[in-house]
Image (cartoon, rainbow, N blue to C red):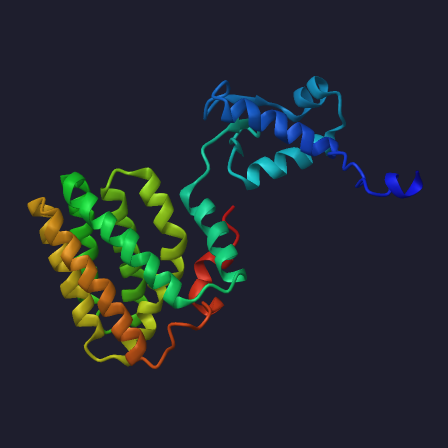
Amino acid sequence: MVAALERFDKIEVASAYQLVADAIEREIMSGRMRPGDSVGTEAALCAQFGVNRSTVREAIRVLEQSGLVRRGADRRLYASLPRYSGLSSRISRALILHEVTFRELWATARVLEIAAAEQAAENADAAIIALLEANQAQAEAAQDDPARLSHLDTEFHQLLAKATRNRVLELAREPAGLLFFPTTELIVRRVPEGAGRLVAAHRHLIDALKAGDAAQAALWMSRHIADWRKGFERAGRDLDEPVERVYARSVLRPPY
């Protein structure tokens, strides 16, 4: 009889703060509570749930970290949409901890960045084209500044993804992109023609978007991503190396 009972695991009882957080999250995820709606004050939540203030505060901390709740200027609590940057940074951290390699990032970029270029050519409007042109002008002026050019390269690809008007694709590519594109700085420092080739590829991509030519956009993005691999290897790096934390400065800072 004792041996039979020992086959069962102990039941894990959820903490009170987790039950409170789960209840609020269900209201938000179901749509019954919309972004911008008041969640209530800490005092009101204590009364509704029948718990103490420390329990409510811990539940709110969990929800704030997930981006589902924010505090307004009046200190009241409101339902909110998780920010892309916060979600992406958390996934990027997980990729680092799993020791993903540059080869994996490159293979992923080949798929997602080309898809983004095609869809951007089909959906880009004048406003996003203007932002890409402004980025391009800054990149052309920053060819002797590898750190600045690397930042602008990351921004360019984020803008191009935004031009797709596809929020799923925009969010899907961001975590890997935050790790992949900062390596531009390394390549530009070690490959003399690296900056010029990057700026030229971006110019062709913008022109393809202006023309609404999805095939040309895909072609130039394919060349651009292939060029990254050549530059990375010419810089003396191994594609099968795990991603280093030095290339992830932006995702190692707290997103909130």
Q: Is residue 110 above or below residue 44?
A: below
For the N terminus, give its image quadrant: top right
Q: Quadrant of residue 155?
A: bottom left
Q: Is residue 180 above or below residue 168?
A: below
| Number of numbered discs visible in the structure rendering | 0
Q: Position of residue 64 (x, y in %)?
A: 56, 37
In the rendered image, the residue lying farthest to the left is 211
Residue drawn at (14%, 52%) of the image: 217
Q: Position of residue 23 (x, y in %)?
A: 62, 25
Q: Is residue 38 above or below residue 255?
A: above
Between 87 and 173, the residue placed more toward the observer is 173
Residue drawn at (10%, 53%) of the image: 216
Q: Position of residue 49 (x, y in %)?
A: 71, 21
Q: Quadrant of residue 170?
A: top left
Residue 204 is left or right of residue 189, and the answer is left
- Visible residue check, residue 76: no
Q: Position of residue 105 (x, y in %)?
A: 37, 61
Q: Is residue 190 above or below residue 35?
A: below
Q: Quadrant of residue 35?
A: top left
- Visible residue check, residue 225: yes
Residue drawn at (35%, 50%) of the image: 173
